[in-house]
Image (cartoon, rainbow, N blue to C red):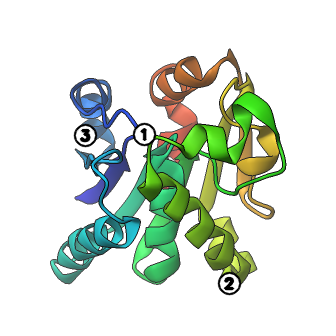
Amino acid sequence: MHKILLIPGLGDQSLHLRFITKQWKKFGLDVIVCPVGWRDGEAFTLKLNRLLKLVDGFTKDGHTVSLIGNSAGGSAVLNVFAARKNAIYRVVNICGRLRTGTTKGFQSFENRTHTSIAFAQSITMLEEAEKTFTAKDRAKIMTIRPLFDELVPDDTLLIQGATNVQIPILFHSSGILSALTLFSNQVISFLVS
């Protein structure tokens, strides 16, 4: 079965993510929610290494592996992808900041990452890793964003050459929930194509 590792955002919510993706099994997708402990003070490299071990275990067993990251999980899954490009089938970033950006104030990198050093490290690591993405790599990536995200500026989550989708929803949390429910057909179609 196609294994989907779903990395939640800063709140590490997993119960509702398991519930809303449970029906994806009928499409051959086994969603495994992997909270990483964003606010536990641990360095991102340790979290990344655990995720890489999961990917390695599943690929060793012959499974197809794809990744979904919500919010802070977006940069995490793209860092996993950067380290295992040949092992990962598809990657989906839902409302996730992928670079520091230039926005000041409430949406600034400093303001949005001040509660999680691991999140800040994940973003800065990805900024370097993204430079290595080829056109073939970028074709494996989908980004999803709402019409307006009060937390994540558009210029910090788009990937040039990827499938960049904007859904007709307002706000960060609503965008994540809608991408996994109302607009899940776009995500599922991308994962199974």
Q: In the image, what residue occupies the spot 35% across and 65% down?
A: 43
Q: Residue under circle 2?
A: 132
Residue 193 in picture, x, y percent from top left: 52, 56
Q: Are marks 2 and 1 in contact (CB under 8 Å)?
A: no
The one of 191 and 170 positioned closer to us in this rendering: 170
* Circle 2 crowding by C-alpha within 10 Å: few under 14, some 14–19, many from 20: few
The image's mark for residue 66 is none
Residue 140 occupies which quadrant of the picture? bottom right
User: Real-space Cα distance between discs 2 and 1?
Assistant: 25 Å
Q: Earlier in the sequence, mark 3 or mark 2?
A: 3
Comparing marks 3 and 2, which lies closer to the viewer? 2
Q: In the image, what residue occupies the spot 61% across and 66% down?
A: 124
The one of 188 and 110 positioned closer to us in this rendering: 110
Secondary structure under tag 1 reads loop
Q: Earlier in the sequence, mark 2 or mark 1?
A: 1
Above or below residue 156? Residue 124 is below
Above or below residue 168? Residue 72 is below
Amino acid type assigned to the residue bearing label 2 in the image = Thr
The image's mark for residue 9 is 1
Q: Residue under circle 3?
A: 25
User: Real-space Cα distance between discs 1 and 3?
Assistant: 23 Å
Q: Earlier in the sequence, mark 1 or mark 3?
A: 1
Comparing marks 2 and 1, which lies closer to the viewer? 1
Q: Quadrant of the N terminus?
A: bottom left
The one of 144 and 185 positioned closer to us in this rendering: 144
